[in-house]
Image: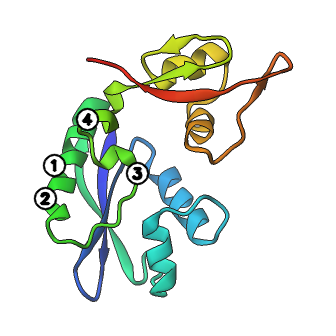
């Protein structure tokens, strides 16, 4: 089961975030950890802290829609994003929110500049090197230092894949 959700300010009714997850309870815990400063903060978390907004008390989580598979979930999330982006209130800052051009997740491959291996997806690269996918994306986005594999410092970069 995959869920698409919104963060909506209770006072104004403004939708300020569109998200999705196959593990909603864990995802809400991640948002809470970011709000406490324990995880990387996105624009939504910085906005909520700056405006003294508490998740659940001041900002409600609205379960927007449900999907049976990941592709359907991504489509529903994109539809919700497009629906609310015109309000000018959305604070999503992840490249996945704009799925055109080079930000299309299906077009973002990975290259290891050390060994020259290229992969069509982050998942295939993380599986090959035995690194969890989320950890791998943190390397790519600069949130973590690049890993050392077999004593050699690696250097992973996103590349554009033609689909």
Q: Earlier in the sequence, mark 3 or mark 1?
A: 1
Q: Which mark is residue 101?
A: 4
Q: Which of the 4 image quarters holds residue 133?
A: top right
Q: Does residue 154 lie above or below 58 as drawn? A: above
Expressed as whole percent of the image width and height from the top left, the position of residue 155 reads: 66, 27
Q: Residue placed at 21% from the left, 71% from the top?
A: 88
Q: In whole angstroms, how far apart are the C-alphas of marks 2 and 3?
A: 17 Å
Q: Which of the 4 image quarters holds residue 53?
A: bottom left
Q: For numbered disc 3, what is the local secondary structure?
A: loop
Q: Nearer the viewer, mark 1 or mark 4?
A: 4
Find disc 1 in the rendering and name its residue. Answer: 79
Q: Does residue 17 lie above or below 161 as drawn? A: below
Q: Quadrant of the C terminus?
A: top left
Q: Is residue 55 visible?
A: no
Left or right side of 41 for 152: right
Q: Nearer the viewer, mark 2 or mark 4?
A: 4
Q: For numbered disc 2, what is the local secondary structure?
A: helix
Q: Residue placed at 44% from the left, 21% from the top?
A: 121
Q: Earlier in the sequence, mark 1 or mark 4?
A: 1
Find disc 2 in the rendering and name its residue. Answer: 83
Q: In whole angstroms, how far apart are the C-alphas of marks 3 and 1?
A: 16 Å
Expressed as whole percent of the image width and height from the top left, the position of residue 145 reads: 72, 40
Q: Which mark is residue 94?
A: 3
């Amino acid at each position: 089961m995959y869920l698409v959700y919104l963060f909506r300010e209770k006072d104004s009714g403004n939708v300020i975030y569109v998200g999705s997850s196959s593990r909603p309870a864990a995802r809400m815990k991640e948002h809470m950890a970011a709000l406490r400063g324990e995880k990387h903060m996105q624009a939504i978390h910085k906005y909520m802290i700056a405006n003294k907004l508490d998740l659940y008390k001041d900002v409600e989580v609205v379960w927007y829609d449900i999907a049976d598979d990941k592709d359907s979930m991504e489509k529903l999330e994109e539809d919700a994003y497009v629906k609310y982006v015109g309000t000018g209130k959305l604070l999503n800052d992840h490249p996945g929110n704009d799925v055109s051009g080079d930000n299309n997740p299906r077009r973002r491959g990975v290259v290891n500049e050390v060994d020259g291996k290229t992969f069509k997806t982050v998942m295939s690269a993380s599986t090959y090197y035995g690194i969890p996918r989320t950890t791998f994306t943190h390397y790519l986005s600069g949130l973590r230092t690049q890993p050392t594999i077999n004593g050699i410092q690696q250097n992973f970069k996103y590349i554009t894949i033609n689909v």
